Image (cartoon, grey):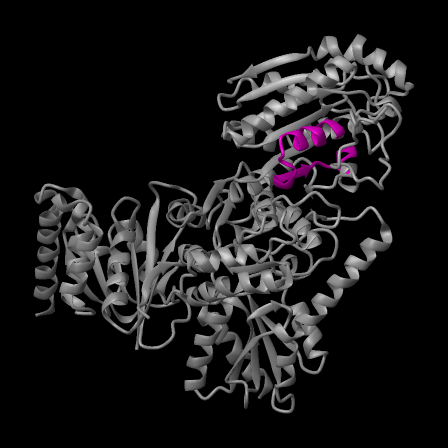
Amino acid sequence: MARVFMKGSEAVAEAAVRAGCRFFAGYPITPQNEVPEYFARRMPEVGGVFVQGESEVASVNMVYGAASAGTRSMTSSSSPGISLKSEGISYCASARIPMVYCNFQRGGPGVGAIQPAQMDYLQATKASGNGGFEMIVLAPSTVQEAVDMTYKAFDLADRDRNPVLILADGVIATVMEPVELPEMKSPEEVKAIKDGKKSWACIGHKIDYKNRAWIEPGQWKTEIQQKCNEECAALYESWKKDAEAELYQTEDAEIIITAYGISARIAKSAVDILRKQGVKVGLLRPITVHPFPFYAFDKIDFDKVKAFLDVEMSIPAQMIQDVDTAVRGRKPIETCLCSGGNIMSREAIIEKVLSMKEQEV
Amino acid sequence: METNLCVAGFGGQGVMTLGKFLATATCESTDKNVTFFPSYGAEQRGGTANCYVVISDDQIGAPLGDVMDDLIVMNGASLNKFLKTVKPNGRLFINSSIVDASEIDRTDLTVVSAPVTELALEMGNAKVLNVIMLGVYVGFTEVIDPEIVWATVEHKLSKKPKLLPLNRQAFEKGMEIGRAHKK
Amino acid sequence: MSEQLIYKRTDYIQADKVAGFCPGCMHGTVMKLIGEVLEEMNLVDKSVCTLGIGCCGLQMDYMACDNITSPHGRACAVATGIKRSNPESLVYTYQGDGDLASIGLAETMSAANRGENFTTIFINNGIYGMTGGQMAPTTLIGMKATTAPAGRNAEEHGYPMHVCELLDKLTAPHFLVRTSCNTPANVMKTKNYIKKAFQYQMEGKGYSLVEIVTSCPTNWGLDSLKALEYLEEKMLPEYPLGVVRDLG
């Protein structure tokens, strides 16, 4: 398939369209303005709907409505906007409505910096809203991966009737790279997907208590609410099979870098350079940050590993909490961090690895 | 093999477009990996603008490296800001109309000067300075077939065909300067 | 003599359910009217109700048609998503004054301003019901609320908000009307307004809002009849009934 040179934010939007997304509502926020702009141009071409909402809050609730009517729907934003969307996400999770959204993270907290960062890891993986719901969270490190994950996210969302989050960052949003776009779903396929949801979609049904579609983000009866929560817990438990990680040069590694998304990509190139210098260093990259790929740590030879190095564009480090759980105190974990919109430096990673190696000698 | 390029200048000098032309042409004509990364700020206009292009045979790590192989500076402020990022014996391309070459306090670099602001004004359109500089860079580095770069420019300007002859002239003028420096 | 059926309970309300509204509350009346209109217009199978939060939301347990519960204030945003992605449905929001005019004012104004092709049924009783009598944007001056124990005063709380008149400043809305269910005549009028609003929606004419001034005996601290008197003496002078806009 021919490769095209695309900006990450636009490539994500195109991938969504190709996956059959026919409703997008969003609100401008740097660095992802090209997402709503792209949908505004593209949706009319495929008979889809684009709405610029009056706020992030309104946008996510439009998606809640459209997805409840059976349409593959999406929204996107960046960190402070994602916080505002948490209301609607929680409703979607509670009512078991499939939808996809993307966070192109920028520096935080508060309005933070508009430049790239990875400051929303804990929010994304632990509590993206009230009520203890969980989502599959995919973390792309290249534009190609962002495209492939977006395409797949709609299937995952429909499979589980649950929101799926693409946790990207300002680099993925703004960088241009060659990508191979996935196959465009035909109008028949898109219709079939929507028709497949007719039994529960809020589109009007024959008047009957049993037939009606009742989108319930909550329950009056506590015993029913508990049952719903138990069903959700079973769903979240079933995601162990979906956990995914990339293990790169870890077989004989003495130092293993843990990093996700853009940091992992930069760390990977640092591993290549260090390997050429004979340094035994590897990379463990969570591809799904939730469920966190704890299994990948079982594939590591802890007799050979001397230490871990957690690399994140977040101060304080956040993913380190999951890494810590996985390592269980067996080896020390050091950090290489930057924040505030600064992009991880490959040189800084190399220096840190070399200094760790030095200390051991 | 990986080449890291930084293009820097005033907002409005077409810095981003220059980088994007080069990166797009690389994507369309080679099997190489390539990234274009614009450094973005809050202002829509004015201020400094810079972007990074990485071209590599292998997977690209950071879309902006710590060390630049090549640096294109379109104004003096950018020279001061980015000169130190160029690797030893790297290549520096300056808009000599407004960048003072005497401020280059390094002797290891290969410096290619082109008065692109003046040349663009002579051609009757100040806006083509970036296309001249694109020609200079491609002419000197031969990083990619010039005709492929031109095809990219032509494609991007397809909605404004009136601008094509001027841009062709600008690109060729740049190529000429770039090639002359090579000799 | 043969029996003749002249009146029947609407199937829109579940036969086996007893509505849990307080005595004297008009939610039940409005629900019944909506059900009757949908049945008369043969639209029940197409109808989707987007419920607000508060006593409005209690409806979901009783109605027999498709419904979705919106986050507090977001009914117009949710309805936008449903209607735009499924234009053949008849979509209406059912919201109270706190939901629509306080937390959801941005969503209400924006949907009306875009001329979204759905209908809003707005229940205005000047107070928060489910949460227990707190002040609403529509609370009258001098009216006591648990969060305005001395009564609403203009200096501190501003003035009662007139939603129909506010929306009348926008260009897009097609039909704006204020009505009540305090008398049999007004109940019939209200039914006709709801029918008209749904008719406009089916004709693709855009946004309409039916504001229904109702009583809340429980949180007004009055019995049902006294509450009706209060509605007529205090609420209606502040919120005059009638068509505010009808573009036909």
What x and y, as percent, mark residue B137? 18, 62
Question: In x, y percent, where is residue A99?
Answer: 58, 55
Q: Quadrant of residue C52?
A: top right
- Residue at 15% in and 54% down: B132
Q: Whole-percent x and y of residue A110?
A: 60, 46
- In percent of the image, x 72 and y 78: which residue is there? A328
Range of residues picked out in magenta: C32-57
Q: Which residue is found at the position 55% from the left and 30% from the top?
A: C201
Q: Is residue C231 visible?
A: yes
Viewed as shown, does residue B76 lie left or right of A171? left
Q: Classify residue A166 as left or right of residue C152.
A: left
Please tell me whether residue C10 is drawn above or below residue B144 in the rendered image: above
Residue C158 is situated, as x and y percent measured from the top left of the image, at 70, 17
Q: Is residue A277 above or below residue C215?
A: below
Residue toward you, C56 or A240: C56
Q: Quadrant of the N terminus of chain C?
A: top right
**Nearer the observer, C240 or A280:** C240
Determine whether B48 is above or below C10 in the image. Answer: below
Between C5 and C84, the residue placed more toward the observer is C5
Side of B112 where C53 appears, left or right: right
Q: Is residue C33 magenta?
A: yes
